Image (spheres, rainbow, N blue to C red):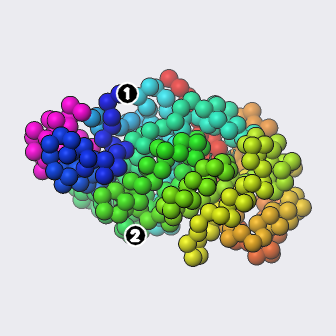
Amino acid sequence: MSVPNLVGMLPSEMEDLAVELGASRYRGRQLATWIYRKGVVDLEAMTDLPKDFRAALAGRVVTALPEVERETPSQDGSRKLVFRLDDGGRVSSVVMPDDGRVTLCLSTQVGCGYACAFCLTGTMGLVRNLTAAEILAQVLHANRILASDVARAEGLGGDVGAPYADQSSSPRHATHIVFMGMGEPLANYAEVVKTLKILTDAKLGLGYSPRRITVSTVGLVTGIEKLGRENLKVNLAISLHAASDEVRSRLMPVNRAWNLEALMQAVRRYPLAPRQRVFFEYVLLDGVNDTPEDAQRLARLLRNVRAKVNLIPFNDWPASDFRRPPLARILAFQSILLDAGIITTVRWSKGEDIGAACGQLKEAVA
Ligand code: SAH
C-alpha cells in the first residue's frame, strides 16, 4: 500500500507530481482531466501524454480502483453496487433514479464504529476507513454504468465522459451525491474532505455543485465545526432520531459524548447559503420515538433552525429489536411537524428488497 494512488489525488497534487517527474504542470492538469472529467484511469489510454511521462508515472503511482463485484437491481429502479476492495473487504453504493435525477449514496468506511442501536452496519464495528480513491471509485463506476445505460438506450456508442451538469430526463451520471452509505463520513475526515474537493472542483475535478452533495453525520461536533470552516458549501445532514437526550443516548451512544445541546449549537453555526437548510434525519421506530409528544419535542428543538426533516420509516433487518410504526402514526408525526411550520418529508427508502435501504448495508466478507 506504499505506492500512492493517482486516483484520489487533488488536481494540484497531480500538477506537483508532474513537475517532480520533470514535466510541466500542464501534464498534471491533463491527468486530472482524464481521470475526473473523462473517467479514464488507464495510463495507456491517455494518448495525448508523452510515452516517457507515462512510463515515469507508472513507476511512481498506481491507478488501481476497486472493481464492482456485483450489481443488484431493485424492483423500484434503484440498484446496489457491491465493491470488492484490495484487502477483501466490501462496501456498497446505491444508485437511485427518481424523476429526472439520479442520487448516488456513497460509503466512506468498511463497517462503522458508532453502534446506533437500529442500524445493521453498526453491528459490524469499524473495520477501516476508505481512501479517497475508494470513495471516488464508487462515483466513477456508477457514472460509467449510467452513461453506458443511456448510450445503450439511445443506440449510440460509448462517450461516457463529462459534462456533469446535464439535466436530461435520464442523466448519464449521478446528479446528486449523498454520503449516507456505510460508515461515518466525519470519522474519516481527511479522505472525505479530499473527495469533496475533487467532486466539487469545477475545472479539473468532477464539477459537482456543492448544493447537490450532502454529508450525513451521527453528530460529531468537532467534525461539523471543521467541515463548516472548509467552506465547501455542501449540505449537512444530521442523523437526529430523537429530540431528548434520554432517548437519543439509548439509540445512539455518540450522544453521550456530544449531547443535543452541543450538537444543536454546532448546527446553528454551520455556514448556510441563502435558502440552504440543514437536513435532519429521523428514523421512526415503533413505540420508541414516534409519539405526538416526540413530534412536538422535535418541533421545539428545531425552532429557530433552518431545518428540513426527513422522516425515515425504520427498515427492518434480521434480529433487529425495532419495528416500523403503522402508516397512520408516521403521517400523524409528519403533520405535527408540518403544522409547526417545519418542512418535513417521509423518505420511503429505496432498494429495501435488495438490502440497499438506509441502515441495511452490510456485506459478507470473503
Ligand atoms: N453515519 C452517517 C451516515 C449514514 S446515513 C449517519 O449516521 O448520518 C444512513 C442513515 O440511515 C442514518 O440517518 C441512519 O441513522 C439511518 N438508518 C440506519 N439504520 C436504519 C434503519 N434500519 N432504517 C432506517 N434508517 C436507518
Task: Work out whether 322 lies above or below 77.
Answer: above
Residue 212 makes an appearance in the image:
no
Determine which residue is flagged by label 2.
167
**Residue 287 appears at what percent x and percent y?**
87, 50
Foreground pick, 318 / 83: 83
Q: Element type at marker 2?
A: loop
Q: Is 237 in front, or is 189?
A: 189
Identify the residue at image location x=75%, y=33%.
319
Say whether marks 1 and 2 touch (CB < 8 Å): no
Q: Which residues are magenta?
A: 41-60
Q: Quadrant of residue 237?
A: bottom right
Is residue 51 located in the magenta-colored stretch of the structure? yes
Tell me how far mark 1 sits from mark 2, CA to CA: 39 Å
Q: Which of the image's four quarters has the N terminus?
A: top left
Mark 2, Cα crowd under 10 Å, few <14 / some 14-19 / many 20+, is: few
* Residue in front for this viewpoint, 58 or 144: 58
Mark 1 or 2: in front is 1
Label 1 crowd (10 A; few <14 / some 14-19 / many >=20): few
Q: Position of residue 230 (x, y in %)?
A: 50, 58
The amino acid beneath tag 2 is Gln
> Residue extending furthest left?
51
Amino acid at pointer 1? Met
Q: Is residue 242 above or below residue 364?
A: below
Residue, x 63% and y 41% (percent of image)? 360
Residue ID at (57%, 76%): 274
In the depicted structure, whether residue 84 falls above or below residue 9: above
Q: In screen coordinates, is 63 left or right of 47?
A: right
Residue 250, percent from left and from top = 82, 42
Q: Which residue is mark 1?
A: 1
**Res. 208 image quadrant:** bottom left
The answer to if 129 sits in the magenta stretch is no
